[in-house]
């Protein structure tokens, strides 16, 4: 189902502010050489839940950073509520996920360039997991 204009607007406002909050927390936390970007924010129709997809570089730090972000979700939500208090009446609950689409695309490209051809043998790529 297509997103409404309201969902898109709230998603873009949240995306911009989540980037600021996470980058500020990362720099204050002393994390060097780690890049966190918000690739997409999808808001449900009733505006109660926002699914935030994060792209984390380097990829091997993704799991531990995601756990840290999930454990600090109430603090992040509070900070976002303070930033958007004039734009949103109620702050949606936040759910964080790792966006692995770039890694998946890279894996396909590497397979196509190499001897292994996933078109001829689809088992080479494995199943893509939804979280």
Image (cartoon, rainbow, N blue to C red):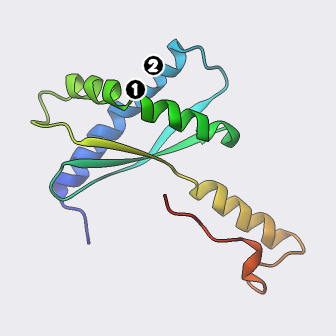
Which residue ends up furthest to the right in the rendered image? 115
Judging by the rendered image, the residue that carries numbered circle 1 is 20
Q: Residue at x 59, y 32 (%)?
A: 35
Quarter holding residue 55: top right
x, y percent for residue 130: 50, 63
Left or right of 30 on screen, residue 77: left
Check disc 2 and report its element: helix, strand or loop: helix
Q: Are marks 1 and 2 in contact (CB under 8 Å)?
A: yes
Mark 2 packing: few (<14 Cα in 10 Å), some, or many (20+)?
few
Query: Residue 9: which disc?
Result: none
Name which residue lies at 70% across and 40% down.
Answer: 60
User: Label 1 to label 2, Cα distance in Å?
Assistant: 6 Å
The residue sitting at 18% across, 61% down in the picture is 4
Disc 1, SS: helix
The residue labelled by disc 2 is 24
The reply, left or right, for residue 87 in relation to residue 12 is: left
Picture residue at 85% right of the left edge, 75% below the top: 116
Q: Horizontal and vertical percent for residue 72? A: 40, 27
Q: Give the farthest residue toward the bottom.
A: 120
Position in image of residue 65 (x %, y %): 56, 33
The quadrant of the image that shows the N terminus is bottom left
């Amino acid at each position: 189902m297509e997103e409404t204009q309201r969902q898109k607007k709230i998603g873009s406002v949240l995306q911009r502010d989540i980037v600021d909050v996470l980058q500020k927390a990362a720099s204050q936390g002393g994390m060097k050489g780690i890049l966190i970007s918000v690739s997409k924010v999808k808001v449900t129709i009733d505006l109660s839940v926002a699914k935030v997809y994060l792209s984390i570089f380097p990829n091997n730090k993704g799991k531990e950073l995601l756990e840290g972000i999930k454990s600090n979700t109430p603090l992040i939500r509070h900070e976002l509520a303070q930033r958007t208090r004039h734009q949103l009446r109620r702050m949606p609950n936040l759910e964080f996920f790792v966006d692995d689409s770039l890694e998946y695309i890279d894996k396909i490209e590497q397979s196509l360039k190499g001897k292994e051809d996933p078109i001829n043998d689809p088992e080479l790529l494995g199943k893509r997991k939804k979280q």
